Image (cartoon, grey):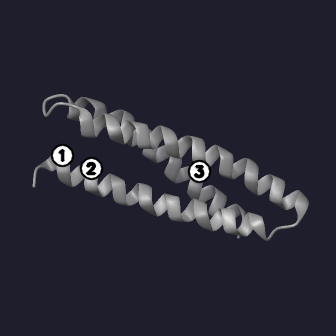
Amino acid sequence: MSNRNAYIKKMQAKLDEWNADIARLEAKADGAEADMKIKYNEKIDVLKEQREEASAKLMEVQNASEEAWEDIKNGLENAYDSLGNAVKSALSKFK
């Protein structure tokens, strides 16, 4: 397996993990009282937007040529760092 394929699989696994975290937050929001539900949903909307950006960056890496994917990798890692921190923050805030 090439480095790129291994990298893509690793990043997809992280994205899948964050998708599960977002789903848990959505489940908590469904059971929350009205004012708390609004806060949950606002944060969830931001997380979903960041997830879409990260997913788009992952697609760029997947579709890039063998020579170009290393250059695109930094943008993906920045998007993943941002999403990872946001998910972690939301999970700790809404325990």
- Which residue type carries mark 3? Ala
**Marks 1 & 3, CB-CB < 8 Å contact:** no
**Marks 2 & 1, CB-CB < 8 Å contact:** yes
Q: Earlier in the sequence, mark 2 or mark 3?
A: 2
Image coordinates for residue 80, horizontal then vertical, percent: 44, 46
Which label belongs to residue 48? none
Question: Are there few (<14), some (14-19), or many (20+) residues within 10 Å of tag 3?
Answer: some
Which residue, given by chain and number where applicable, does mark 3 sit on? 86
Image coordinates for residue 28, horizontal then vertical, percent: 72, 69
Q: Is residue 92 left or right of residue 50?
A: right
Disc 1 versus disc 3: nearer the observer: 1
Please tell me in which quadrant of the rendered image residue 70 appears: top left
Question: Are there few (<14), some (14-19), or many (20+) residues within 10 Å of tag 1?
Answer: some
Q: Is residue 60 left or right of residue 81?
A: left
Per the model, the C-alpha gap separating discs 2 and 3 is: 21 Å
Please tell me in which quadrant of the rendered image residue 62 appears: top left
Which residue corresponds to the image point at 52% horizontal and 48% vertical from the top-left? 83
Which residue corresponds to the image point at 19% horizontal and 28% vertical from the top-left? 68
Q: Is residue 22 above or below residue 8?
A: below
- Which residue type carries mark 1? Arg
- Which residue type carries mark 2? Ile
Q: Is residue 71 left or right of residue 50?
A: left
Which residue, given by chain and number where applicable, does mark 2 sit on? 8
In what element is the residue under mark 1? Answer: helix
Which residue, given by chain and number where applicable, does mark 1 sit on? 4
In what element is the residue under mark 3? Answer: helix
